[in-house]
Amino acid sequence: MTSPTQASALPALDHEHYLRLAFDVARRSLQNGSHPFGAILVGPDGSVLMEQENAFQPDHDMTGHAERVLMTRASKAYEPGFLRGCSMYTSAEPCAMCAGAAYWAGIGRVVYGLGEHEMKAITGDHPENPTLDLPCRVVFDAGQRPIQVIGPLLVEEAAALHEGVWDKH
């Protein structure tokens, strides 16, 4: 849920444009041998401040989700007051861990492609992605400050990133 103050503090952005940039990062992640997830941090002026591929490889870090790593980096680089005016665009809905990281970092808006429910249907019981079917909105609603959530968007494009990836065990 977004309060009127929160919504007006965030810039109007072309969500599909930035989401497709996150998809590009996800494709690059797959080309680099990791899972096809990508996230970008967009500043209040529309500039891309950071991007992050999935960080599962090379160490098999099960917490190396692109969104979590991006939020860790962002929280080290920027103050929460600045991050409240920023947006995270991500190829898939942040899981509970990543939503928690976004909340603690202080991000103002999350825009995602593929929803967790759809992600779980795609990955099944793959041991490298035991997807939690828990919407990020539920995590954010448990917090003490609002985070605007937009998604799912461009679902077919987001799902295409995962074609054939999770078939192998």
Image (cartoon, grey):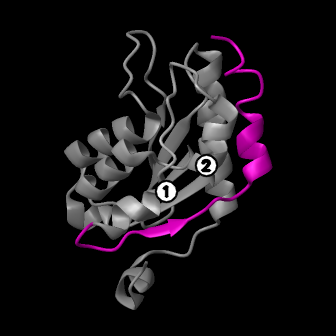
Q: Is residue 153 magenta?
A: yes
Q: Residue at x 46, y 66 (%)?
A: 45
Secondary element under disc 2, as helix, strand or loop, is: helix
Circle 1 Cα neighbour tier, 10 Å, few/some/many (<14 / 14–19 / ≥20): some
Where does label 2 land, which residue? 117
Q: Residue at x 31, y 61 (%)?
A: 83
Q: Nearer the viewer, residue 83 or 112?
A: 112
* Above or below, 91 relative to 123: below
| Residues drawn in magenta | 143-169
Q: Residue at x 22, y 61 (%)?
A: 80
Secondary element under disc 1, as helix, strand or loop, is: loop
Magenta stretch, main secondary structure class: loop
* Above or below, 72 relative to 54: below
Circle 2 Cα neighbour tier, 10 Å, few/some/many (<14 / 14–19 / ≥20): some
CA–CA distance in space, label 2 to label 1: 8 Å
Where does label 1 land, which residue? 135
Q: Residue 31: x percent and y percent?
A: 65, 17
In the displayed image of the protein, which residue is found farthest to the bottom?
4
Q: Residue 56: x percent and y percent?
A: 44, 20
Q: Earlier in the sequence, mark 2 or mark 1?
A: 2
Q: Is residue 69 magenta?
A: no
Q: Quadrant of the C terminus?
A: top right
**CB under 8 Å between callouts 2 and 1?**
yes
What is the three-letter code of the residue carrying label 2? His
Q: Residue 84: x percent and y percent?
A: 32, 67
Which corner quadrant of the image does residue 106 belong to? bottom left
Which corner quadrant of the image does residue 76 belong to? top left
